[in-house]
Image: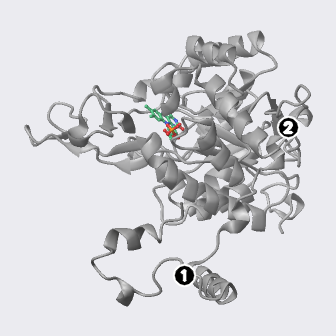
Amino acid sequence: MESLTLRASPSTASPLQRRLPGRRATSVRATASSGAAGEPDLSVCVNGLKMPNPFVIGSGPPGTNYTVMKRAFDEGWGGVIAKTVSLDAEKVINVTPRYAKLRAEPNGSAMGKIIGWQNIELISDRPLETMLNEFKQLKEEYPDRILIGSIMEEYNKAAWHELIERVEESGVDALEINFSCPHGMPERKMGAAVGQDCGLLEEVCGWINEKATVPVWAKMTPNITDITQPARVALKSGCEGVSAINTIMSVMGINLKTLRPEPCVEGYSTPGGYSARAVHPIALAKVMQIARMMKEEFDNGQSLSAIGGVETGNDAAEFILLGADTVQVCTGVMMHGYPLVKKLGTELQDFMREHNFSSIEDFRGASLPYFTTHTDLVQRQKEAIKQRKAIRKGLQSDKDWTGDGFVKETESMVSN
Ligand SMILES: Cc1cc2nc3c(=O)[nH]c(=O)nc-3n(C[C@H](O)[C@H](O)[C@H](O)COP(=O)(O)O)c2cc1C
């Protein structure tokens, strides 16, 4: 197990030692307080940040200005991560349309339920000064609520330091670093261009952690072969937590009338980022991989914020069962609105009641030990079959398929 004191840092004090005393990310992870008697307690305390529940607005349109972030606090979200900001918003030029949706109905019928969402939206195009004034105002009005600034900059140490200083001055409680925006500005070495290159990532995380005085979460891209590699680099470089996942590189579709890809801007398109329900299983796999790595290699309160396709309390429960401390929601809020947090809370409490869990910590990571290799599954099944003395579940081998009983035989191998 690796401890914080063992981690190398550019100066003698570890990045965590340099955090402000009130915000230090030592191994604080116990639940913040107990709820009313008999009510499952949703409160969490992550890297010293106390939240009434684990539900956090993920960076994007739901955290794009004062009005919407205020709405999120009023509706009861545990925390808000603002839309990503950079020093010079004038360099950020968005196009329209920039969203495309995948619907569950055949032929993408407009009536069908939205299951996938693609965006080619860039980071915030609002002036940094405006965003910072709004952060300040929010923190003045909601001093006890958690506001996290999301930041992204070019490959330039001075620029990163200036951005961190200015965003911290606005009073944010923590920083999330966008190492994961999949589209736009790779030529400026921003977003996923850093998150996909562990060498660059280590260097930039070093710059960030020598400057930051509040907890830092590194937001990971799923558009990489092994997501544990950049997650490990970020944590070793002093980040207090990782967030995963950002959107998945996607092409939403081709219009079969015009033969043009979508979303179509002046007849052309570019691959975008995929989110919403359809990405949830992929996000679960990425979060599981990171959680296993963190459990094996880090044990000093480093945190994990899970993101991807959350629309129900059960979706959130799944992430927490894999080891997530907090659960972010972005597209779900765009589809269902800010009151979604009430439904998430009620459903998560129903789940907790069913299992007699009184706090989030009671079940965080509880499903993680049940992942293993395929080879191990084969071995376990062999043993189980031996022990059950020939109680058959499913076919023993591909030669046993009969063709006639195909549907029944397939059913016999489904887990529920
Ligand atoms: C329209 C849109 C804009 C987004 N903008 C940002 C952004 O500025 N910074 C960021 O870190 N993530 C951004 N994201 C990614 C989300 O925060 C989140 O990681 C991703 O959408 C998966 O979660 P979800 O399925 O809950 O949306 C954006 C997502 C969408 C849909």
Q: Is residue 281 left or right of residue 36?
A: left
Quarter of the view holding residue 262: top left
* Disc 1: residue Cβ within 8 A of ligand 1's nearest atom: no
Q: Position of residue 273 (x, y in %)?
A: 40, 43
Q: Earlier in the sequence, mark 2 or mark 1?
A: 2
Tell me what residue is drawn at x 55 percent, y 29 percent. 85
Q: Secondary structure at mark 2?
A: loop
Q: Position of residue 51 (x, y in %)?
A: 79, 30
Quarter of the view holding residue 407: bottom left
Residue 194 shows which numbered tag?
A: none
Tell me what residue is drawn at x 92 percent, y 36 percent. 21
- Single out the mark in the foreground, 2 or 1: 1
Q: Is residue 290 left or right of residue 118?
A: right
Tell me what residue is drawn at x 76 percent, y 68 percent. 296
Q: Which residue does the numbered mark 1 point to in the structure image? A: 392
Viewer-closest of 393 and 366: 393
* Disc 2: residue Cβ within 8 A of ligand 1's nearest atom: no
Indicate the amino acid at tag 1.
Answer: Arg
Mark 2 and mark 1: Cα distance apart in space: 51 Å
Query: Can see residue 242?
Result: no
Residue 151 sits above or below residue 205 on the image: above
Quarter of the view holding residue 99: top left
Q: Quadrant of the C terminus?
A: bottom right
Q: Which residue does the numbered mark 2 point to in the structure image? A: 48
Tell me what residue is drawn at x 71 percent, y 35 percent. 350
Viewer-closest of 206 and 114: 114
Query: Can see residue 120?
Result: yes
